């Protein structure tokens, strides 16, 4: 696993917006443009209303992503995620992110992710205070700030989260990555870049575009301009 990705500028297209009848082709198309982080949105119909992807899909795409030099960034929007960490790790996940709101024993579950050989992340919903991260800054490899309420792709970007993201960058050690997820697109990425975030999830802005490769290149150009 390439550890540099966590602290460098990376676009992380979310396969939730891909065409599942040709998932491999869609992944290959964005990786051909230089994408190295593939974001996988896991939803349980409990923590969020939607039900999406399980470990079997991670297993299905792991070789394709790893052989192209990429990592699988698995975002668990599920209650009591400790029940499924080991399954997702075994399936080939490289980064596993859990929600602070969904986790009773946050420190323990983060340790479980690292013990399974994965990078550990914590995600906060738009209304969740940054203080939820305060006591685990030394136990995470990245933090993920939601700029939509989790559950669906294609929602409107919530700009009022931006100051919290900037404060997160100051709170977190330099070696901890800062990821932003929800409504990231050509018209919002500059404001997100201003916060100091370095990892950018984009679902509909990439796979909803007529040419996902071109859309990915456009977003990566905005990031490269800040590098
Ligand atoms: C939302 C998911 C996101 C979503 C992003 O619950 O966590 O990763 O797929 O989609 P866009 O970029 O369309 O908001
Ligand atoms: Zn996500």
Image (tube, rainbow, N blue to C red):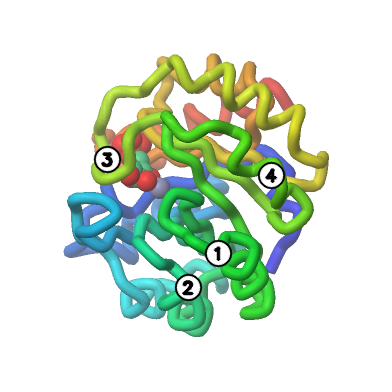
Foreground tag (1 vs 3): 1
Left or right, 139 with respect to 173, comes to: left
Number of numbered discs overlaid on the protein picture: 4
Q: Nearer the viewer, residue 167 or 210?
A: 167
Residue 216 can be seen in this image: no
Q: Quadrant of residue 182?
A: top left
Could you tell me residue 223's position as x and y percent? 61, 28
Q: Quadrant of the C terminus?
A: top right
Residue 12 can be seen in this image: yes
Determine the residue positioned at 49% across, 57% down: 98
Mark 2 vs mark 1, CA separation in Å: 9 Å
Q: Quadrant of residue 125?
A: top left
Q: Earlier in the sequence, mark 2 or mark 3?
A: 2
Dot 4 corresponds to which residue? 177
Q: Earlier in the sequence, mark 2 or mark 1?
A: 2
Determine the residue positioned at 52% across, 78% down: 89
Could you tell me residue 50's position as x and y percent? 19, 53
Mark 4 vs mark 3, CA separation in Å: 22 Å
Query: Does the numbered disc 3 mark a residue whose Cβ is under 8 Å from ligand 1?
Result: yes
Q: Nearer the viewer, residue 109 or 3?
A: 109
**Residue contact at pointers 2 and 1, CB within 8 angstroms:** yes
Foreground tag (2 vs 1): 1
């Amino acid at each position: 696993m390439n550890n540099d990705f966590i602290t460098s500028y990376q676009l992380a297209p979310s396969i939730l917006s891909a065409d599942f009848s040709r998932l491999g082709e869609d992944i290959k198309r964005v990786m051909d443009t230089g994408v190295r982080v593939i974001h996988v949105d896991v939803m349980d119909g409990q923590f969020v209303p939607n039900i999406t992807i399980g470990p079997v899909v991670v297993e299905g795409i792991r070789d394709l992503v790893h052989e192209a030099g990429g990592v699988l960034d698995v975002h668990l929007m599920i209650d009591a995620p400790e029940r499924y960490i080991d399954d997702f790790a075994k399936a080939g996940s490289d980064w596993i992110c859990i929600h602070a709101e969904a986790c009773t024993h946050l420190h323990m579950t983060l340790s479980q992710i690292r013990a399974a050989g994965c990078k550990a992340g914590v995600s906060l919903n738009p209304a969740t205070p940054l203080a939820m991260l305060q006591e685990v800054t030394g136990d995470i490899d990245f933090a993920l700030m939601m700029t939509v309420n989790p559950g669906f792709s294609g929602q409107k970007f919530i700009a009022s989260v931006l100051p919290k993201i900037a404060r997160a960058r100051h709170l977190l050690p330099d070696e901890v990555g800062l990821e932003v997820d929800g409504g990231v697109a050509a018209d919002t990425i500059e404001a997100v870049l201003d916060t100091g975030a370095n990892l950018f999830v984009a679902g509909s802005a990439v796979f909803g575009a007529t040419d996902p490769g071109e859309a990915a290149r456009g977003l990566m150009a905005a990031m490269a301009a800040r590098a």
